[in-house]
Image (cartoon, rainbow, N blue to C red):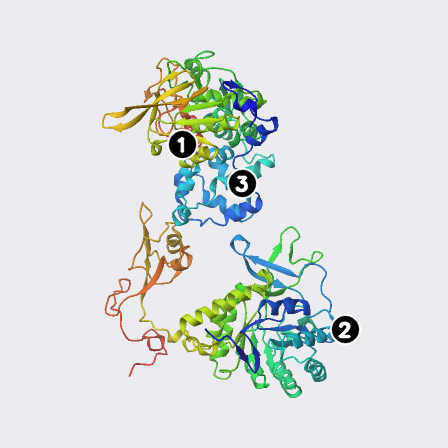
Amino acid sequence: MSAAQRQDGIVAGRLAPEAYAENFTDAYPPLDAHEALVAADRCYFCHDAPCIAACPTEIDIPLFIRQIQADNPKGAAKTILNQNILGGMCARVCPTETLCEEACVREMAEGKPVEIGALQRFATDTLMATGTHPFTRAEPTGKIIAVIGAGPAGLACAHRLAMYGHTVIVTDARGKPGGLNEYGIAIYKTVDNFAQAEVEWLLKIGGIRIETGSVLGRDYTLEELRSDYDAVFLGMGLSGVNALTLEGADDRISNAVDFIAELRQSDDLSHLPIGRRVVVIGGGMTAVDAAVQSRLLGAEDVTIVYRRGQDRMSASRHEQDHATSAGVRLICNAMPVRGAAGGVEFEYTKETADGLKGTGETFMLEADQVFRAIGQTYQDTQAAALDLERGKIRVDTEGRTSIPGIWAGGDCAAGGEDLTVTAVAEGRDAAESIHRALSI
Amino acid sequence: MADLRNDFVGIKSPNPFWLASAPPTDKEYNVRRAFEAGWGGVVWKTLGLDPHVVNVNGPRYGVVYGADRRVLGINNIELITDRPLQTNLDEIKAVKRDWPDRAMVVSLMVPCEEVCWTEILKQVEDTGADGIELNFGCPHGMSERGMGSAVGQVPEYIEMVARWCKAATRMPVIVKLTPNITDIRYPARAAKAGGADAVSLINTVSSITSVNLDLMAPEPTIDGKGSHGGYCGPAVKPIALNMVAEIARDAETRGMPISGIGGVTTWRDAAEFIALGSGNVQVCTAAMTYGFKVVQEMITGLSDWMDEKGYADTAAFSGMAVPNVTDWQYLNLNYVTKARIDQDQCIKCGRCYAACEDTSHQAISMSADRTFEVIDAECVACNLCVNVCPVENCITMERLTPGTTDERTGRVVEADHGDWTGHPNNPGAVAAE
């Protein structure tokens, strides 16, 4: 252990320079062709397969795996991408252990599902390595659609619309397209700048223009969009972060999502400061990504503290295991009370009929740095022009909002889990609805 | 413990597992390794007249894979030995001298002229070999020169050559048969008529295993061309079992010793061949796929199973299944079964449903929660669901007790045997007395 590693406070360069590349490499390396064939041979080609039903984008999984078996990985990729244009990213970031792989009959049979996610990555990587785009754009329709947000929902929507021959202008508040794929996911899940490579590949369909650094409500209004475009799709995600103030620790607390974004955009991780002792408050995938990457940056002690029981954590068991195997400590049933010199005081909790209550027992965790990862919120910049539902934009089954001509999907829309794959499904389905509406 | 010692037409070996005449028995080095590994005997790779033949210098084998690249079948275009006759004879003599307890049978293939056979037989006798096997089976290459399966496809030639050999040697004569014929009983009868001591079968099946779609040529491909080969391995076992059974139950050949060959991979395969009347078995593809050590699984597996069943030696169960091989017309039509799905074992893959719904009799129902159940009123007991289910014994066929009603036909299941010979729909039915 180097001296820098033991240095208190939030400092950069805790590790030897070469350690960073090693730490932030692919957490789950891709299958090679042989491994893919071995894995594919395990698929039973189930009838009306449960894995398809478990996939928010309803990829025909048995078919694409059979195509891999039959030496047609590019055909397999087309089967995937036809349902999910971001199938490459989803193969990397989907919590498959709670989706397709949980439903796999071999999970029931042997406790070892077919490696669907890894096979999906094999197929999509094989196709993308050729540099070709498997879809062609229909004759231009002359219709122009505005897509707000270049994240998974917006990109999926834009691609499907472009395929139908519509012209799509995608605007995004950030400097790069990709949304959370670019800013919100751990490096070791999306190495080699995959998010940008995927966007570039997706844009090969043609008919899509991306404008970054443009913010709805600041640079343009919803009314302007409605009058200037034939249709509008809102997929700007969640820009708010749930508040958590800790008296006495405010100088040490920051948002996990900002930390992850900074990591992803860093050119040199050895310049990124990290605490010696890090506490992450929350129980979701963002908490895990922040905690694990803190360890990888050289933090000596990293603890995730979650206020409810472990079974209530929204990070899957697989994610939790990933965290603990990276040396992250997991404390459940505890909530932060106040900051103290060099640490944070927590109180144990219990579930009661009246909700979660503190038990009165407290403990102290040393912490140079605290990340809050207790969820994000939709920030309504539209002065309630759109009807909301539980704090997010209300949509119907086709993604239509309360205002005619405006659709929404992804994390900013109500309903569905806040997952990349769910956002893709919603963006795609909204595009189908927009296309139908414009074709009348 | 079961006694695996084998006496096949007077040829003794410590166990019934012989290596078939094929690449693994091509030369001294291989055969010594085989004996060290535990093989009971070998049939030395086929000898011919000098000048010796040559082999292609490109690939000799093609393959068919199952899941996970498991070898299901190999085809080959290798010819008989491509070394001088004397070299082989010297090696055979040396190995037999060092391994006197192992069976040493020599495969032969020379032109259909009596002098060719009598000459080579004398030379083989001098090696101390235990027997000879007449290669009337290889379907590739040699058959173009009037040998191998070209002889095996003409019963008169089989009989003629077998007779020459029996007259010329003290050694037992085994005739190896080709499956590339329409009715295996004719060549087997011819071998018997010629005085052969035994038949061995099957040799390989004429085959093209695959086509290279870039070269547009069959594989294995030699400079853009391919030639049919001989197919062997687990894929041909069902063909071999049927042919062995046909000979075992034929009125003319019943009781003739049979050395069973064709896809023997485990002890169970060997037990099946023996149950259908084989006195021993010959193996090639399993050894070529996994090496000589596989015989150790075969020996222990057969021995353990025999102990469990109380069979003192292989003769105790050899041919036991033969009386149960019958013609379709004698099958009991009053034996009514239905598929039964064990819900505790079901993994809900739905393959039984897809198979039955799409290609059979719509006799399996599927609920919203993926519970699959047999509809007795539709089930014809075809067994397809059992075959496609990935979980062994999850679906079974169970007999309806006589006296109960078959929901499909509405008829009460009869206890007595009733077959096609007496069925009212059979124009040639013999009325019951």
**Dot 2: element:** loop
**Dot 3: element:** helix
Residue B265 visible in rendering: no
Residue B165 visible in rendering: yes
**Dot 1: element:** loop
Q: How crowded is mark 3: few (under 14 residues within 10 Å), some or many (20 or more)?
A: many
Q: Give the x, y percent position of residue B406.
A: 27, 65
Q: Which amino acid does label 3 sit on?
A: Ala
**Residue on which the image places disc 2:** B51
Q: In this view, does A45 lie to the left or right of B169?
A: left
Observer-nearest residue: A19 or A115?
A19
Q: Residues within 10 Å of mark 1 (few under 14, many from 20)?
A: many
The residue shown at (49%, 38%) is A80
Q: Which tag, 1 or 3, sits closer to the chain's start?
A: 3
Residue A315 - label: 1
Q: How crowded is mark 2: few (under 14 residues within 10 Å), some or many (20 or more)?
A: few
Q: Which of marks 1 and 2 is in front?
A: 1
Which residue is at the far top? A218
Label 2 resides on the chain identified as B
2 and 3 marks on the same chain: no
Q: Which of marks 1 and 3 is in front?
A: 1
Q: Which amino acid does label 2 sit on?
A: Pro
Q: State the quadrant of the N terminus of chain A.
A: top right
Q: How much space separates mark 1 and mark 3, taking CA atoms?
A: 27 Å
Q: State the quadrant of the C terminus of chain A.
A: top left
Q: What residue type is labelled 1?
A: Ala
Q: Give the x, y percent position of residue A171.
A: 49, 19
Residue A123 - label: 3
Label 3 resides on the chain identified as A
Tell me if residue A408 comes above or below residue B183 in the rendering.
above
Tell me if residue A222 comes above or below residue B108 in the rendering.
above
